[in-house]
Amino acid sequence: MKRRILVAILAAQVFPAFHTGAIAQHQWKTDRIEMVVPYPAGGSTDTIARAFADALRTQLNTTIVVQNRSGATGTIGSGFVARAKPDGGTILFTPSSPLTITPYFVNLPFKPLEDLRPVASVAISPGVLVAKRDAPFDDFAGLVAHAKRQPGAISIGFPGVGSVGHIGVAQIEQAAGIRLNQVPYQGSNQAVTDAIGGNIDLLVLNTDAVLQQIANGTIKPIGVTSPARLQALPNVPTFEEMGFKGVQFFSTYGIFAPAKMSADAVAELTRAAQAAVKDKTFVGLLQQFQALPGGQDHATFVASLKDENRRIGETIKSSKLVKP
């Protein structure tokens, strides 16, 4: 009897971390999660969010309801989650731009990176620079040479002031030492139409927005912002390949929670999210959007967002995109 007790005590001393971790893993549980998408139903963010919710639902074995709370470039829905109860019942699915870019352009009633807690990255959607079909250049070197001969003559469109594309245009100008005629659009559809019609020289957009037009030859690709070449555009170089490491614009999708959500809830959601991004159906959907699976854990995601926010701030300041 004494020997059995001694063995039990020794086991508890040798494996305390394992024992505690096993208990902690199941400390947080909720019957229903409202996943807020701060953009309208039917768009790319909404489509990716709903596919991710299906994969996450399987991992957590709980009900997940996707709610669209759109408006004010994603900040209405983001603010709603920032003010929600931090019990894990309300989370946010969004690209990082409303949290890392918009605050530089708009005074918000909340502080995104303080009032929201990053949980895990879900996907990365690279950007692409494209030109109209009859542009007098076929690559970035030719574009730069043309722009230096005629500063401000080349027009470049992007989907909205304060968008990822807006930051991308500023990075391109800085990296290449050129000046372009910036043309903001209200979304990507009209921008693509104008490029096809030859009414604008260049566009900066998410890759999925112009993939079909590239395939049809109605516009031509110049460079992609992904770390490696994209499977769908194997002949299109990255900006890093071309010697411009400072050109890094892409949409990082992630899940966020109210800042005071418990560490147990964050840990469980992170675990579930990292498993969900490997779901075959979800990965297949990402491929349709030319997006790459995420999967960064809480700590890594926080660090990457801080770095993204820093780089954006430096770009905005040096390009004087926002008047002091």
Image (tube, helix red, strand yellow):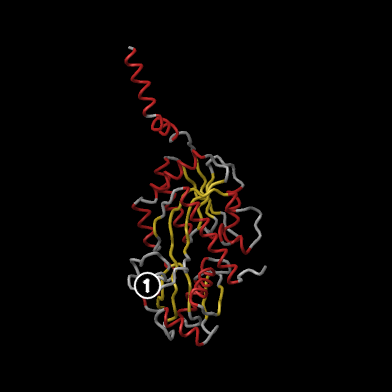
Q: Residue at x 56, y 76 (%)?
A: 183
Location of residue 145 in the rendering, given as x and y in whole percent from the top left corner: 46, 84
User: Where does the C terminus fall, quadrant-wise?
Assistant: bottom right
User: Where does the N terminus fall, quadrant-wise?
Assistant: top left
Which image quadrant for residue 242? bottom left
Which image quadrant for residue 211? bottom left
Which image quadrant for residue 314? bottom right
| 145 and 123: which is toward the camera | 145
Q: Amino acid under label 1?
A: Pro
| 163 and 212: which is toward the camera | 163
| 86 and 69: which is toward the camera | 86
Location of residue 201 in the rendering, given as x and y in whole percent from the top left corner: 48, 81
Q: Which residue is mark 1?
A: 237
Location of residue 170 in the rendering, given as x and y in whole percent from the top left corner: 54, 72
Q: Residue at x 66, y 60 (%)?
A: 107
Does 256 appear above or below 125? above
Q: Residue at x 51, y 48 (%)?
A: 35
How dense is the environment of label 1, judged by Cα within 10 Å: few (below 14), some, or many (20 and up)?
A: many
Q: Residue at x 38, y 32 (%)?
A: 18
Q: Residue furthest top?
A: 1
**Is residue 282 left or right of 68 when viewed as pictured?**
left
Location of residue 104 in the rendering, given as x and y in whole percent from the top left corner: 61, 62
Does 90 appear above or below 8? below
Identify the element where label 1 is drawn.
Answer: loop
